[in-house]
Image: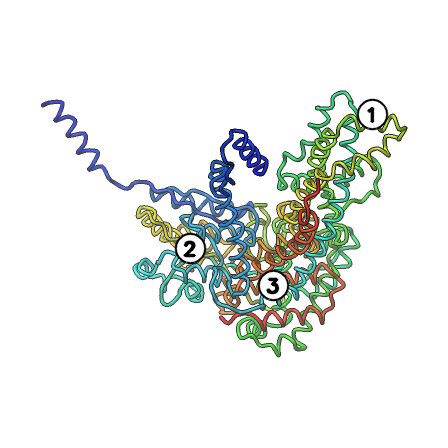
Amino acid sequence: MATSSALESATGAAANGKVATRPNFLTRNTQAKLASVPMFLVVLGVFIGGSIWTIVYSFTRSASLPVMDWIGFAQYDRLFKTTRWVISVKNLALFGVFQLTFSFVVGFLLAVFMDQKIRFESAFRTIYLYPFALSFIVTGHVWAWIMNPAFGLQKAVRDLGWTSFTFDWLGNRDMVVYTLVIAGLWQGTGLIMALMLAGLRGIDPEVWKAARVDGIPTWRTYISIVLPMMRPVLITTLVIAASGVVRVYDLVVALTQGGPGLFSEMPAKYVYDNMFQGALGQGLAASSVMLIATGIILIPWAVVEFGGKRRQ
Amino acid sequence: MKKFAVVATMAAALMLSTGARATDVEVTHWWTSGGEAAAVAEFAKAFDATGNKWVDGAIAGSGDTARPIIISRILGGNPMGATQLNPGKDADDLVKAGLMLDLTDLAKSEGWADIINPKSQLASCTYDGHVYCVPVNLHSAQWIWINRHVYETAGVPVPKDWFEFVKTAPDIAAKGIVPLSVANGWPVQTLLADIEVAVAGVDNYVKVYKDRDIALATGPEYKKVFEAMDAARKIVDPSTMVPQWNDAVSLVIQGKAAANVMGDWAGGEFTVAKMVAGKDYDCLPGLGVTPVLDTGGDVFYFPKNSNADVEKAQLVLASTLLKKETQLAFNLKKGSLPIRQDVDLSAASDCMQKGIAILKSGANFPSNSQMMDRDSLNQIRDIYNNFFADKNVTVEEAQAQFADVVKNAPPL
């Protein structure tokens, strides 16, 4: 946008007959620049400053309070030997894959369903989006009660007559991660649906007409034509969903408290627990590992996506 | 002139009527079960009677949930008026950073060194000769609580110690009753630590935790400990584990479970349920193996506050917590032992009397939080939790992990 306005001012100046001088990089759009100064300060101080502080202090022996007592990579050493961290990472991978896959597939199908010009569309949209208004803590507690074998779903189905029905995934070390997936899907799919619906609505209706004229079936149109056109929306949604997955903490605390033993531990919970229970350096090391891992995935992709020649 | 006189008199009256203003003191704690809430209400009543106001800041969950909240509030500059913590190393860093109120003068003037027994409790509150916290009770963790009616109805003899309990557990399970109720989280560590002390013996336990005797931690004595823990995890069906410690106790109270290993604070729950020791339930100290008890407990710290009125009220609160009447009222409801034994304990329950007898005999040892830092204790808790929940972890693996933590724990 800055480029086009510079172009305009340059051509405008030329049209006036005056000599067009290149607008000074520093002085053009001063109002926009002033308005974004708070954002820059926050980014510099909080995001960048906080991250640097975290990484620096992860090399120290901080226990309850941060102390500049350098011990090199010892915290990282301990981190990767700790069973709890290894389990957390495995759980996050499992949770992430299932959460992202299912929420995208189901979200997209729901959005397609809503896009069919149905009646009561806004009512359906509200119903599907409603769980997102609840915090993860409420979601976790509600699902903890539903999945409680003593008085939840298991008991209800058994009371209906099917006495051998068991649903005790909460206490089952192999299945407890999937309880998190269920609660997370219930809460987050609505948002994915809403974002996808917005993306679908942004598709030019001419595309639909053209596809109909060509005789392409509707489902094929969605998959081969519409989805690729929705790429920016898909990427935005992926970033939002993935950041929610990596951050998952309150859902674990409310639903499983880390699960039977350590079986539903998550990295964010490891970071928080260690930071405030006398192992600050350990929590910071875990946090730095999460940051670096995210960076390793995102930065090459960002370079591919946004670097190089800008496509028209 | 008359008007001026009236106004002047009113102003003077206002200025002179300083008097004792009621100060609010926010107190955080994690005493949220039935028995505990009744007990802390006694503290609140006693403090309100001094003319100040106890603003209750109960934190739901356990010490593990509450401790980070409390510590981050103090560090973050939004301190409460007073807070419960466990004695030992929890607040070490905070005291070293100068964030806690110095109670030394109050301690001297009220003679705490003479009142508080055992002396180790006041010693845990003393750093560099200065007193920073006031102990309010004595808790021991080495108890097994057995529902007598369950055994009597099942026709199984009521076990007299842990080993008998393990032997008769299958008979109880066959009757459809949960032999051992366990709650998720720190109660697993309590169970395994109690087995640890019962099987290894107090001397070895203290040698490992306090003196960091690695040869002992990797040796055959501790192998027996992990084998006993293995036996325990074989008895417990993971689907029967409940969220909170008081849920596990209430399973025993309701007769749905036969026994529960929990500290003496479970006694408060039995009292609230109006059950009688020796008739409805048994409480065996030291798991019935050797009657020894650790001396943990609760202490109150007072974060420094810039307001002088609050500081005065904090000192009043510290003094109130140790008064004879308050100690008696609080501890009777809680099931713990009072920190001063010059009170009339005839109304105490049977289990409390057992505890007092053991205390008088000197058969007590320091609680783990007084021997090792919280971080290492948390790592041990995670190792025990994982060992208990994951049957694929072998006894050898768990023992090696445990010895590792002991080796790397920072010195006292």
- Distance from the alpha carbon under mark 1 to that under mark 3: 64 Å
Q: Position of residue B195 (x, y in %)?
A: 64, 65
Label 1 marks a residue whose chain is: A
Front: mark 2 or 3: 3
Front: mark 2 or 1: 1
Report the amino acid beneath label 1: Lys
Report the amino acid beneath label 3: Gln
- On the image, numbered disc 2 is attached to which residue? B301
10 Å crowding of disc 3: few (<14), some (14-19), many (20+): some
Tag on residue A166? none
**Residue B237 visible in image:** yes
- Using the image, determine if residue A59 lies above or below residue B306: below
10 Å crowding of disc 2: few (<14), some (14-19), many (20+): many
Question: Residue drawn 35% across and 58% down?
Answer: B103
Report the amino acid beneath label 2: Tyr
Under circle 1, the secondary element is: helix
